[in-house]
Image (cartoon, grey):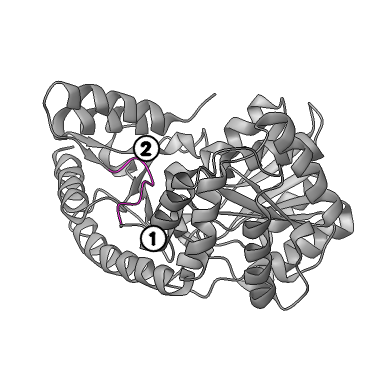
Amino acid sequence: MGQKMFAVLEQARRIESQGAKVYHLELGNPRLPPPPAILSRTVQALIEQEVGYTQSAGHPALRQAIAQLRERAWGHTITEANVVVSPANLIINQFFDLVCDPGDKVVFFTPAFPSYWAAATHMGLQVEGVTLDLVTGYDLTDEAITRALAARPKAIVVNSANNPTGAVYGREPLERLAVECDRLGIWLLSDETYGEISFGRPFHSLGGLELPRLVVMSSFSKLFSVPGYRIGFVIAHPDVAEKFALSVSTLVSCLPIFTQLGCVAALDCIEDYTASVRERCVSMTEWCDQALQGTNRISFVPPKAGFYYFLDISACGLDDLTFAQRLLEEQQTAVTPGSSFDPSLRSHIRIATCGSVLDVHEGVRRLVALAETL
């Protein structure tokens, strides 16, 4: 199945190879400089020739640092045995592989991150989408939770703060979902990758609940602006974490030591750095809100976290693929089709606002300009 945003990127690169400028709004590829500590420690590790194998579950120093960070945040004991380091996209595949059999049903609250769809399809799973509504700000409602549980799936994936909508779900519905999943024997993956860059509503992590079928995942790609490091992590019951570690051993042996040690160093400044990321997100969101409100052809809910907008373009009279193609060809601006996040959402697109300020501003202006011509 793959991910359409990378197909868009490839097409944009072909246009660039012919000498044209393309404004990239399709990928969540942060352009803020990473924390200096992560780069200097990575370089130091390379100079020290830390290029061999390490534990499949992750370098002990990184696992310990993650455990300490989450223990302080969640208020209960987290140890190295609860933590496994793995690429975030791979974690999604690993989760489905470990808890599901081919033909099992899984539920996503949609619009949902394309990797969930791709991984479930790859594993031969049945996907049931529970669509959240623009009218409610794409919030997680009791009605949506009831529908998800009524499907009696093997597993549910919940993503707060959300990609692509920027919604941040409230404590009560999240905890209701987790407790009911535990009662019904349903596995729950809580993807909290964007939680620490929430700015419009308090973020609530499900990691504060000690439930045996709950797996919490996150990533350093967005937190530290290092997507190329490909380092994510899961926190789960030790027995579940052990299965993830065996999966890493089978699939990739281990992640590089030098990038893991870089992340250890960056964790010492995580609060200051994520504060700067949030500040940047707030500034960019304020500008984009104003620019997008300049046309009545686009409907949206301002994000409360991260750097994505999920835009309803139904008033433009084009489906998502046609709109994205015309925007790239006519305005040299790349976006992600909405059907990447749910096959039924053909009247939406997603834009990412984490590129350079000048490029994002110009790309959004061009998007609005195309919408106004339709």
Q: Is residue 69 above or below residue 351?
A: below
Is 263 positioned to the left or the right of 10 in the image?
right
> Disc 1 or disc 2, which is closer to the eye?
2
Please state which of residues 163 and 278 is positioned toward the viewer in this rendering. 278
Distance Cα–Cα, label 1 vs label 2 = 17 Å
Query: Residue 140 bears which disc, if any?
Result: none
Identify the magenta region: 25-32
Residue lying at 63% horizontally and 52% vertically, measured from the top left: 233
Q: Which residue is mark 2?
A: 336
Quarter in which the N terminus is drawn:
top right
Towards the viewer: 21 or 273: 273
Image location (x, y in percent) of residue 28? 39, 47
Q: Residues within 10 Å of mark 1 (few under 14, many from 20)?
A: some
Asked if one can make out residue 124 in the rendered structure from this viewpoint, the answer is yes
Residue 29 covered by magenta stretch? yes
Residue type at tag 1? Val
x and y percentages locating residue 137 in the rendered image:
47, 62
Is residue 146 left or right of 276 when viewed as pictured? right
Quadrant of the image containing the C terminus? top left
Which residue in the structure is indicated by mark 1? 301
Q: Which residue occupies the extreme left position in the image?
A: 19
129 vs 293: above or below: above
Rendered view: 198 above or below 164 = below
